Image (spheres, rainbow, N blue to C red):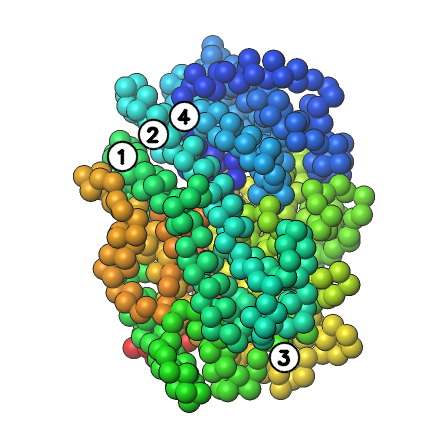
Amino acid sequence: MRRADLVRRVSLAMSLGAFLGVSVSSAQGATMSAKDAGFGPSNPFYAKSTLPFEAPPFDKIKDSDYEPAIEAGMAEELKEIQAIADNPAAPTFENTIVAMEKTGQLFQRAQAAFDGVTGANTNPELEKLQEVLAPKLAAHRDAIYLNEKLFRRVAAVYEARASLKLSPEGLRLVEVRYRDFVHAGANLSEADKEKLKKLNEEESTLSNGFRSKVLAGTKDAAYATTDKAALAGLMAGALGGAEAAAKERKKDGYVLPLQNTTQQPVLSSLSVRGTRQAIFENSWTRTERGDANDTRSTIARLAQLRAEKGKLLGHDTYAGWKLEDQMAKTPDNALKFMDALVAPATANAADEAKDIQGVIDAQKGGFSVEPWDWEFYSEQVRKAKYDIDDAQVRPYFELNNVLENGVFYAAEQLYGLSFKERKDIPVWNPDVRVFEVFDGDGKPLALFYCDYYKRDNKNGGAWMSSFVDQSKLMGRLPVIYNVANLPKPAAGEPALISFSDAVTMFHEFGHALHGMLADTEYPSLSGTSVPRDFVEFPSQFNEHWATYPAVFAHYAKHYKTGAAMPEELATKIKKAADFNQGYLLTELVAAAELDMQWHTLPVSDGLQDPDAFEKAALAKKGFTLSYVPPRYRSSYFSHIWGGGYAAGYYAYLWSEMLDDDAYQWFQDHGGMTRANGDRFRKMVLSRGNTEDLAKMYEAWLGSAPNVEPMLKYRGLVKAAK
């Protein structure tokens, strides 16, 4: 996941931070707040960082430093923006468009660090600050995008663009900037702008509240027990981790924290059915308990006000507005693509359920398969079909070895990169590691942080973001980070992860590569600054290298002996790649369809009851398999209510079509070679948003994208026919 952060420049606040926006008067208040806070040279954000790559000085940053720096940064940027708007000279590319690229340096470095820490290492003080800042950050965006004088200058440059003799990237910047303003409501009447500001203010506040509730609700819903027998089946390392988690929370016994998805990885090994059911139900109801963390009223209102916002901005629905600048263009296009996957996915899932039920019946279980049974019994089916189980596999996937000899190795083979760990760069938590990245010619390329272990004060899931974006204009190299939520082992124990966890590491590093390999002039077009339904393409493409023979053999080694995984076991893993794909695709498509159903609600439908709406929406789209719940339930679907993926979760599926087609191209042209990697880097990864993305992709591939490789890699070709 590419985290939808607020750290990006104002031009990207529109495309990646759709929950921003409130009143100009609130933004103007930032000047007084910053002054009152006494912001000055003692604040670590006052001047740009002197660390390598301008990395944030986390060893000097205190929680109390963020608010005055962000307030002062917003005030400074508004002053810079207003100077551009008030410039008496005729608008030009340099004095308007490029000038905007140079604004907001203080704001950017303070907000980038704040966003990183609040996502991965928050605390009550920072959570409270998020609540305070949310409407102010939103106001800051509106103060720029709804500035009539500024928009007139941007529009003038846009209208004259054909005669300006701009570089292709410069022309793209003008077009993107203009579309961002229009998309944000710059063409609305003054009265409608005021309505939009109020909608944006409420949306930003509710989204921030939703994130806080999900974080707290997920923590509170962890499964706790003092009965070791209830955890029968857990590997020793996982059991030790559960004991350590309990001690950290000052509890007796064992604690199994929840991950952000509906299903929980531990369900594959727990043999006590009652334990599995309790964990699943904790996950399913984590934010539906009628307490302070219940999100249902929040999401009902968010859906309603987004419908109002879509209509105000000239569309029938919020999704119609949201997708106008995406590759899919319209909700109908996205829905047509997803709807075609429902039948083959659910048909495969139903066949998989028969196999699972067969195992249950053979063991005289006396029950029908339920969601909390799927992971446990599907693991038995997998073992029976492929003579493989998770406990057999994990010793070959030690986290640090996967990172250095798998993830990094693939990047070395494809792009010539090398990595050197830096112990002198300050971090936000002791778990974090930092690496300097070098290009094939030995020149510094980027700085990379990785923070992989789960903590109660960390948002769920896995993501990538940046502290510094690459830009030739600004003379900057990228500072990138990956965050995940892998179980932390007990002290002295190895971090043995599942193969799916290893694939996730490759995924997030694919986003990181998109940022690291950026080679653009303007920061607004750099790296991952692309539409939502393209941003997941490089990350999902990078997943394929996790099973590429030369890469797999280099990192799949026993943590004790260093011996390579036996060929027989490696072959079984690769043969099992299609296993459970019906279930996995069904839960993913169900979540994507659920997202789109929420965001294609017309204003006339009014406030919805989330439970009733979710049930009806899934049934409407053909998701009637009770044992396959959506990957995320509405009430904890952080991607769409608090993470920038509203009306955009389909992007994972859309990008999968692109990435599978891309990998097929590599297979057809010699596989993992530097020539192929360099071509992909030059024509795609380095280009960011500097050209039309559909044309960029087709120029590299040599044709329009084809869905057949996706069906092939998902094992759905027969079902689709």
Looking at the picture, tell me which residue is in the foreground, 654 or 452: 452
Q: Which comes sooner in the sequence, label 3 or label 4?
A: 4
Looking at the picture, tell me which residue is in the foreground, 154 or 304: 304
Label 4 residue SS: loop
**Residue occupied by mark 3:** 392
Please give the label number shown on residue 631: none
Q: Are marks 2 and 1 in contact (CB under 8 Å)?
A: yes
* Quarter of the rendering occupied by the C terminus: bottom left
Examine the rendering and report whether any part of residue 452 can be seen. Answer: no
Q: Which comes sooner in the sequence, label 3 or label 2?
A: 2
**Residue occupied by mark 1:** 308
The disc labelled 1 sits on which kind of residue? Answer: Glu
Looking at the image, which residue is at 34% across and 41% down?
297
In space, the residues marked 3 and 4 are separated at their CA atoms by 54 Å
The disc labelled 4 sits on which kind of residue? Answer: Val
**Residue occupied by mark 4:** 22
In space, the residues marked 3 and 1 are separated at their CA atoms by 53 Å
Classify 10 Å Cα crowding around label 2: few (below 14), some (14-19), many (20 and above): many
The disc labelled 3 sits on which kind of residue? Answer: Gln
Looking at the image, which residue is at 64% across and 51% down?
249
**Residue occupied by mark 2:** 199
User: Residue 583's spot in the image, x, y percent?
Assistant: 40, 70
Camera-near label (3 vs 1) is 3
Looking at the image, which residue is at 43% across and 61% down?
281
In space, the residues marked 3 and 2 are separated at their CA atoms by 53 Å
In space, the residues marked 1 and 4 are separated at their CA atoms by 15 Å
